[in-house]
Image (tube, grey):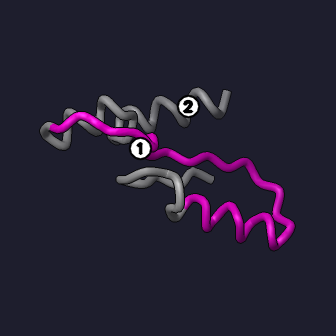
Amino acid sequence: MVVAENHTVIGGLGEAVAAELMRAGVSYPFRQVGLPDAFLAAGALPTLHDRYGISTSTMVEAIKRWLV
């Protein structure tokens, strides 16, 4: 399961999903994709999505690496 977020992964949907999976006793491969907890550069969204790994193409490549 991959949860992608257009903001920091800290305190986001991914953490809530991970907590629910754990409470339910579900052991399932899980990854979060999102922004780091840091001051980030400003700019056009497509450029920033590529830079921080949350564009469609960068997420597809990351998921392919995880599945190997």
- Is 20 covered by the magenta stretch? yes
Does dot 1 land on a helix, a strand or a loop? strand
The residue segment tinted magenta is 14-42
Q: Residues within 10 Å of mark 1 (few under 14, many from 20)?
A: many
In the image, what residue type sits under mark 1? Answer: Leu
Does dot 2 land on a helix, a strand or a loop? helix
In the image, what residue type sits under mark 2? Answer: Lys
Q: Name the residue under label 2.
A: 64
Q: In which quarter of the image is the C terminus?
A: top right
Q: In which quarter of the image is residue 65?
A: top right
Q: How crowded is mark 2: few (under 14 residues within 10 Å), some or many (20 or more)?
A: few
Q: Which residue is drawn at 42% across and 54% down?
A: 5
- The image shows residue 45 at horizontal and vertical percentages of 19, 43
Return the mark for residue 35: 1
- Is 27 covered by the magenta stretch? yes
Q: Residue at x 63, y 32 (%)?
A: 66
Q: In this view, does 21 lie to the left or right of 25?
A: left
- The image shows residue 63 at horizontal and vertical percentages of 54, 36
Q: Nearer the viewer, residue 38 or 32?
A: 38
Q: Quadrant of residue 22?
A: bottom right
In three-dimensional space, the C-alpha distance between marks 1 and 2, rounded to whole angstroms, equals: 19 Å
